[in-house]
Image (cartoon, grey):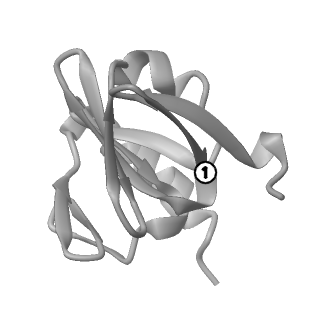
Amino acid sequence: MTDITESTFIKSGTEIIRINFTDILYLEGMKDYVMFHLNDNKHIAYYTLKSLIEKLPDDFMRIHQSYIVNINKIEKNKDNHIYIKDKVIPISKSYRDCLKGRVSKHFL
């Protein structure tokens, strides 16, 4: 069984679903809703990115007005975009330096 500190529950439609933080690739904001993009599926829930970023573990970072990413899932960073699986996500100018600092901690 998963430890509660490694996961959370979200309400998606009429379901309450447990999501492991390690399964989250990125979150995509859509006004008052957020699409949770996971390793194997997606869920939409009534949240804002602003409310979620304060509750997520340190592995998550906002990189754009519409995106929060799991730093551990970034495959590459090129031309002010990051790549997670087949998704190309833009990095806003205001978040570039912060992202560079976070990623540099993982350099060899």
Q: Residue at x 51, y 52 (%)?
A: 101
Q: Is residue 39 left or right of residue 63?
A: right
Q: Quadrant of the C terminus?
A: bottom right
Q: Is residue 88 left or right of residue 53?
A: left
Give residue 54's quadrant in the image: top right
Q: Position of residue 1 (x, y in %)?
A: 83, 58
Q: Is residue 57 visible?
A: no
Viewer-nearest residue: 54 or 13: 13
Give residue 67's quadrant in the image: top left
Viewer-nearest residue: 27 or 43: 43
Q: Position of residue 41 (x, y in %)?
A: 34, 61
The kind of residue on which mark 1 rests is Phe
Crowdedness of circle 1 by 10 Å Cα count: few (<14), some, many (20+)? some
Q: Position of residue 91 (x, y in %)?
A: 22, 48
Q: Secondary structure at mark 1?
A: helix
Q: Is residue 32 visible?
A: yes
Q: Residue at x 48, y 24 (%)?
A: 52
Reading the image, the residue beneath label 1 is: 21
Q: Residue at x 36, y 25 (%)?
A: 49
Tally of marks: 1
Which residue sits furthest bottom? 108
Q: Is residue 7 left or right of residue 16?
A: right
Q: Is residue 39 left or right of residue 43?
A: right
Q: Residue at x 61, y 51 (%)?
A: 21
Q: Position of residue 16 (x, y in %)?
A: 52, 31
Residue 42 vs 93, above or below: the answer is below
